Image (cartoon, rainbow, N blue to C red):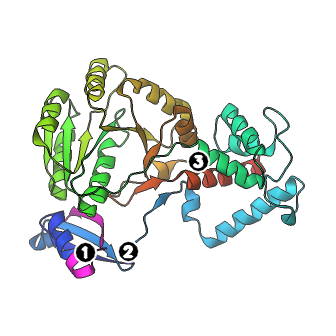
Amino acid sequence: MQTKTYFASSVPAALEVARKELGAEALLVNSRPSPPEARGFGRLEVTFAFDPAPAEAAFEPGPAAKRPASELDDIRQQLSALRMAVGRGPAAGPVLQAREEPGPGQGLGHAVLTESGLDPALAREIAQAAARRPGDRTDALVHELAGRIPQASFPDMKPGESRTLAFIGPPGRGKSTTLVKIAMRFGVGARVPVRIYSAGAHGVGCQEQMARYATILGVPFQAFESVESLGLALDGDGWKGLALIDTPGLAPADRAETAELARFFARRPEIERHLVLRADGRSADMLHVVSRFSALQPSRLVFTGADEMLSAGAMVDTMIRAKLPAVFAGTGQQIPNDLELVDAARLARSLFEEGALAAMAA
C-alpha cells in the first residue's frame, strides 16, 4: 500500500481528484489543516491510500494485534507450556482438551476467563456451557464466548437510504471525536452524503469545534439549543444520507437534560443511539453508566480508548451483561484511522489468549 497527499480547499475536492488519479478504490486516511508554508496550495492537507486498497479492519484488542512475529512465537511456546502444565503434551490437543468442568469455580476454562477479566459468575457459566460442547475444548470455549457477545453490523449505505446515529454518554468519553471518524470513514470516504447536528447545551467551545470539523470535511452542520428544534429540522428536510447527532455529555446531576433526551428518543425509534464508554475502565463502572443512561434506551455501545486498555475483559463483560452490541472501537486520536469494527469471534479469541497467558503466570 502506498499513500499520496493532496492540498485542497475541501475534502470532497481532494477526494474527486484522488479517485481520478489513483482509482475508485483510493481510501481517505487523514485530513488536517495545511502547514503555514503550504497554505498557498490549499487550506487542507488530505492523504489517501491506494494500490492495493487496504482490507477493512476488524477489531482485535490489545497489544497482540501489533506483536512482532518473534513475540507471537513466544506466546505459542507459552501456550504449549500451559498445555504441558495441565498434563497434556502437544500431541494431546489444545489447552482445554480436558474433562468436564468439575464444579462451580473450578476448571481451567473458568480460570482462563476469570484471568481475562470476566465476572467470575459469568466465566463459570460460559466455561460450564463450553464443557458440554463436543470436540475441541479450546474452540468450544472460544465459540461459546463469541456466541455470548452481542454483535451488530454497520452495512454499507445504499443510494437514497437514510440513517441517523446519535452519540450519548458522560462527558469526556470521546463522543465528538468518534462522530467525526465515522463521518469521514463511512460518509465522505464512502461517497455518502453526511450531515452533522449538535443539540443541547454543550460545554464551552464544543459546538465551535464541531463546526470546524464539519468545515474541514465539507459537510453541512447545524447546532440547536434544544432537541425539539432538532426534531423539527429532521422532520422538515426529507434529506437522504448519513445524519450524525452530537449530544452534550451528561453528568448524574443533569436529570432535566437526560429526561428531555429520553422523551426525544422515545418519539424517534429510527435513531441508533450509541452509548460511548471508555474501554480501559472497570466493567462495574461501565455497567453503572449503562444503567444511568437506560432511560435513553441505547441500542449500541461504542468503546473509546481501546489502545490504552490492558485487557478486553471489562469491555466483553459489559457487552454480555448489558446485552448491548458494539459496532465501533476507537483505538487512538487519529482521524479516521483509529476506528475499528468490533468482531465477536476475533474478540473472543484474543480474550482467550490473554486469559490463558495470565492463568499460566498466576
Label whose residue precedes the other's in the sequence (2 or 1): 1
Question: Which of 182/284 is in front?
Answer: 182
Q: Position of residue 188 (x, y in %)?
A: 23, 60
Query: Considering the image in quadrants, where does the N terminus appear?
Result: bottom left
Residue under label 2, please give it: 53
- Asked if residue 347 can be seen in this view, the reply is yes
Label whose residue precedes the other's in the sequence (3 or 2): 2
Asked if the residues shown at circle 3 and circle 2 are in contact, with their CB atoms under 8 angstroms apart, the answer is no
Helix, strand or loop at label 1? It is strand
User: Which label was assigned to residue 247?
Assistant: none
Determine the CA span between mark 2 and mark 1.
16 Å
Instruction: Please determine whether, in this image, residue 54 is positioned above or below residue 361.
Output: below
Residue under label 3, please give it: 311
Q: Which residues are magenta?
A: 19-36
Q: For residue 203, which quarter of the picture?
A: top left
| Count of marks placed on residues | 3
Could you tell me which residue is drawn at 48 percent across and 49 percent down? 306
Instruction: Please determine whether, in this image, residue 295 is positioned above or below residue 269.
Output: above
Q: Position of residue 335 (x, y in %)?
A: 32, 57
Q: Position of residue 83 (x, y in %)?
A: 82, 57
User: Which label was assigned to residue 5?
Assistant: 1
